[in-house]
Image (spheres, helix red, strand yellow):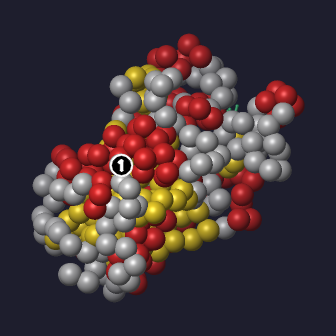
Amino acid sequence: MNNKAKVIGTGSYLPERILTNRELEQMVDTSDEWIVTRTGMKERRIAAPDEFTSTMGVIAARRALEDAKLTPQDIDYIIVATITPDYPFPSTACLIQQALGAKKAASVDIQAACTGYLYALSMAKAFVETGVYKNVLIVVSEKLSSIIDYKDRSTCVLFGDGAAASVVSLEGKGLVIQSVRLGADGEQADLLKMAGGGCRHPTTVETVEQGMHYIKMAGNEVFKHAVRRMEAACKECLEALQLQELDVSWVVPHQANIRIIDAVAKRFEHLPPERIYKTVEKYGNTSASSVAIALHDLLQNHPIKTGEKIMLTAFGSGFTWGAALLEADR
Ligand code: ACO
């Protein structure tokens, strides 16, 4: 498998502060019972005022580098996927590059909302398999609490902060990236967006007063698309490799809602429930970070044997979606 890109190291960082459903009951008209039954979430993490997408990303990146037994100087390219960059510019990737001391690494931010990790994975795979770059560092990090309206019960219960990172290389043991399949549909852009702060609606007193710097989501519509697209992406990914659902040992889906996860899991009914990996209860939806945090959690808590196949799948604003099949070579 030496000609295929591998994830050779992973790490994550979750802020200390826990926001519980009980606390949310004090903030908006909701209940622990509604949140648990409708979303599967019990708590989520919230970054401290002096923690940012870059600083959380740096901690996750250091952990992933340590896991990969590489130093920042070994990294040739840094891809950061986020919808909550520290600034519109410069990129969060450049801030992370500087903090790590990864002096030779070219650095760029990408934006594919909750599908960010899978988009980054496909880029890293292409770069290392074509020999353009040797070691690529992916960082996914979100301070979603900075764009949440804590008066809007339809969104504030769903999202949390956190970061994860992966090192992708041809050399070393790890998870072979067998295939990544991606999709997008800009027709649905209005169903999930933050309208203010870009060049269409530059920040003004009016955009702030109208709440245009917060996430707005038509949850119910998004839900239906999410299930359909993730199911189709998994199917496409397996077909590309001439594999079947039965060949999959673990599924790590985007952690947006337990009901979405359960619906996608129906494709993999041969797997016991614990093999559909979930962190939604403790971390909520961390957008770009979600799948990568869950993947790192899985690797920490379960010995994955050589040959076992892990299906990743995600869906997010844009709309964007994707699936990736990783095979353990450890
Ligand atoms: N507490 C109590 N009631 C609530 C809450 C709440 N926190 N939020 C909404 N409700 C109410 C609504 O007002 C509505 O009341 P009504 O019937 O009186 O109008 C009722 O609950 C049902 O609302 P729905 O929106 O239909 O609820 P639904 O079962 O669809 O659950 C949810 C909402 C959790 C948002 C769900 O639709 C969902 O998970 N959607 C997908 C999210 C997702 O996948 N996002 C993609 C990635 S995110 C990204 O890219 C940044």
Is 142 placed left or right of 325 in the picture?
right
Residue 51 vertical placement versus 87 (above, below): above
Q: Position of residue 268 (x, y in %)?
A: 34, 65
Work out whether residue 172 or residue 14 is closer to the camera in this orientation and state it: 172
Q: Secondary structure at mark 1?
A: loop
Res 245 quadrant in image: bottom left
Q: Position of residue 248 (x, y in %)?
A: 27, 69
Is 305 placed left or right of 80 in the picture?
left
Residue 243 vertical placement versus 320 (above, below): below
Is 225 placed left or right of 1 in the picture?
right
Residue 292 in view of the camera: no
Image quarter where the N terminus lies is: bottom left
Within-10-Å neighbours for mark 1: few <14, some 14–19, many 20+: some
Looking at the rendered structure, the kind of residue marked 1 is Gly
The residue under the point 40% across, 43% down is: 99
Work out whether residue 140 or residue 132 is closer to the camera in this orientation and state it: 132
Residue position for label 1: 101
Q: Farthest front residue?
A: 103
